[in-house]
Amino acid sequence: MCYAIPGKVKEIRGKQVLVDYFGEEKKAINEFYDIAVGDYICAQGGFVIKKVKEDEAREVLSAWKELFFELQDIDLRLSRMDLGEGSDKKLRLILDKALENIPLKKDELLYLLDLDSQQSCQLLYKSANFLRQKYHKNSCCIHGIIEISNHCQQQCTYCGISTHNKDLPRYRMTQEEIIETAVEAVERYGFQALVLQSGEDPGYSVDELAITIRKIKEKVPVLICISFGEVGLEGLEKLYHAGARALLMRFETSNPKIFARVHPGQKLETRLEHIHKAASLGYLIMTGALIGLPGQTNEDIINDIYLTKELGAEMYSFGPFLPHPETPLGNLKSPSEEKVLKTLALVRLIDPEVAKILVTTALETLEPTTRKKGLLSGANSLMLNVTPVKYRKLYAIYPNKAYSDELISTQIEEAISLLKSLGRAPTDLGVSKVI
Ligand code: SAM
């Protein structure tokens, strides 16, 4: 649950609070605040991140109320669904099942992933969007990401910041820079959830990262998601105690043979062990896979979605592999936009009620106009780049990365304007940025 607008506490049971948002009830965990029934709070990813004064909350809510219902109406209109009488009877039967929340069999999912006519794909996307609206209403997460270092000791054969890329100038933000960037993202731009990401950089110790996180949490109310790669199980514990509450770590592929081929020296089990450990500690899990790795079949992609669900993911991060010329896989092709959109739609069909689905920057790099299509194919989450502009181009995991130059304010304006046109409520950005 993450509406950036304040909600009113209706009920408290131990650490769990029930919060009312214009009649919609959501649960959140309160770990740090002295809260009573009737108080107003803001929550992110199911965690209370701040208590809000009553007069402040009322002001925000009265400004929001009309817009909130207006947006919901637009969204409802755009997500209406009619399977019609088109020619593909098998497709209609499968989608009918999905729309009634009957789990699809693997051969049915494969049929959907194999679709190639525009008309059939559109029907799949619309069904996914219908399910997104049915279970998640019009909320859309917007997290910020700060890419704190492009140093990496791993040799992933697809990644432009791996050890393969000898010519890339490397940077590592100082603790002060990271804190300053995070505080600005929260106080100036209104972000309520931030991902801190880096390559696997031995230049930061886990203890240093923990201090950085603790200092950010002392300065601003924000949900912190870590994405530093394999920091070790003890490392995960330390970072949790420092205040991190979400982990973004893709397992990249559920196929152990492909995993071994593209990750020399790494093991799929180790990554999965990290994700399991993080879940057991109480982290929100954001995970997923790359679409289009060499040797990957459609069945692999479906297995990737199944694995993400088994891992208890709150957010699904599935994006295209984009070849980087300075890596061993530099001569390969990226998958089609359609393949990625179909995968996002399948995620929605497989995990309709829980999945927050990200439109990744990689997908937007593959096809710049695709954000809208992603949001209309089952997705309900965006990540904006709040890394200082001087570093962004150096975080070159693939070439020509989207949003390498755009000011944060421009990115926010573009995102909000698109979301409003689709009737979506941006749920992780301070409300002043919305109206
Ligand atoms: N070190 C962390 C980790 O291992 O999860 C985070 C950094 S890593 C560079 C972030 C993500 O970039 C990876 O999960 C991977 O899927 C993605 N990535 C790397 N190279 C890519 C490429 N060529 N195309 C698309 N995505 C890529």
Image (spheres, rainbow, N blue to C red):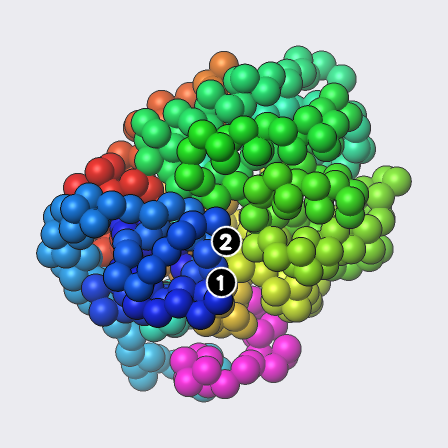
**Circle on res. 232:** none
- Which residue is at a point 38% across and 46% down the rendered structure image? 50
Label 1 Cα neighbours within 10 Å, binned few <14 / some 14-19 / many ≥20: few
- Residue 151 found in image quarter: top right
- Of the 4 image quadrants, the one containing the C terminus is top left
- In the picture provided, is 8 more to the left or to the right than 229? left
The relative height of residue 263 versus residue 91 in the rendered view (above or below) is above
Can residue 74 be seen at all in this image of the molecule? Answer: no
* Residue at the disc numbered 2: 31
What amino acid is found at the position of numbered circle 2 in the picture?
Answer: Glu
Name the secondary structure under disc 1.
Answer: loop
Above or below: residue 259 compared with residue 212: below
Q: Position of residue 113 (x, y in %)?
A: 56, 67
Residue 14 in the image: x percent, y percent?
48, 66
Left/right placement of residue 287 relative to residue 327 reads: left
Q: Please say whether residue 101 is one of the residues in the magenta stretch.
A: yes
Q: Residue at x 60, y 53 (%)?
A: 283
Q: Closest to the observer: 214 or 153?
A: 214
Residue at 71% in and 30% down: 207
Q: Amino acid at mark 1?
A: Lys
Q: Is residue 111 magenta?
A: yes
Query: Furthest residue to the right?
Result: 265
Q: Residues within 10 Å of mark 2 (few under 14, many from 20)?
A: few
Residue 236 against residue 177 in the figure, above or below: below
Count of picture labels: 2
Whole-percent x, y for residue 120 in the image = 42, 70
Q: Which residue is mark 1?
A: 15
Q: N-terminal of the two: label 2 or label 1? A: 1
Residue 84 versus residue 376: which sits nearer the camera? 376
* x and y percentages locating residue 181 in the rendered image: 46, 23
Pick whichever, 36 or 161, lies toward us. Answer: 36
Q: Which residues are magenta?
A: 95-116
